[in-house]
Amino acid sequence: MYKRILIATDGSALSDKAVEHGLALAALTGATVVALKVVPRYPRSYFEGGVPADMNAVKHIEAQWGDAAQAMVDGVKARGDAQGVTVKAVIAKSDLVAEAVIAAAKKHKCDLIVMASHGRKGLKRLLLGSETQHVLTHSHIPVLVLR
C-alpha cells in the first residue's frame, strides 16, 4: 500500500498524535518514514515581525532552532526504531511551511503525507491561514490529517 510516508511535525501535542499514527501506519504497511521539521528563518525586519538584531545573534538563534528541530526529528527516529520502522530525519529551512512539506514529499518520493490539523478557527484562521489546508489543496499525493 504505502512504501514511504512523510510525517511532518512541529513538536506540539497534536503533531505528536500525527507522529504516533504515522509510525503505526508505517509499521502496519512496512513503509519507511521521512520525519520532517520545517524551520523558518529569523525575521530580519520589523515588518516581518522581528526585533532588530545583529547578524551574529540571528545566526545563533537560527542555530538554536536548527538544533531543536534536529532533536525533534531524532526523537521521531528513536520512536520509529522502537517500533521497527526505518525513519529518515529531515530538516527543511523555509518560511513557506506548506511548500516545504510538499517539496520534501516529492524529493523523497513519498506516497503519503501525515500531519496534524491545528484547528485554527475564525479570525486566527483568516489572518494566519492554515498550512495543513494549503498542503491538502496543493499536494498531488494523499494527505492524512489528524485532529
Image (tube, rainbow, N blue to C red):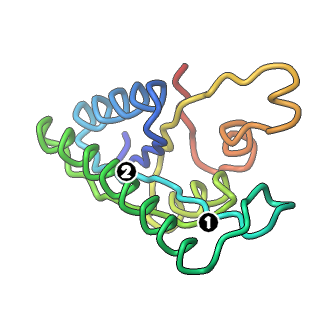
Residue at (28% x, 29% y) in the render: 24
- Badge 2: few (under 14), some or many (20 or more) residues near its Cα, within 10 Å? many
Task: Write down the quadrant of residue 52 in the picture.
Answer: bottom right
- Where does residue 132 sit, x and y in percent of width and height? 66, 38
Residue at (37% x, 43% y) in the render: 2
Q: Is residue 133 above or below residue 120?
A: below
Q: Which residue is mark 1?
A: 41
Residue at (71% x, 63% y) in the render: 43
Q: Quadrant of the C terminus?
A: top right
Q: Is residue 61 left or right of residue 52?
A: left
- The three-letter code of the residue at mark 1 reads Arg
Q: Is residue 146 left or right of residue 91?
A: right
What is the tally of numbered marks visible in this picture? 2
- Badge 1: few (under 14), some or many (20 or more) residues near its Cα, within 10 Å? some
Q: Which residue is mark 2?
A: 35
Task: Write down the quadrant of residue 51 in the picture.
Answer: bottom right
Query: Mark 1 touching mark 2, by CB under 8 A?
Result: no
Which of the marked residues, 1 or 2, is nearer the chain's N terminus?
A: 2
Residue at (51% x, 62% y) in the render: 104
Mark in the foreground, 1 or 2: 1
- The three-letter code of the residue at mark 2 reads Ala
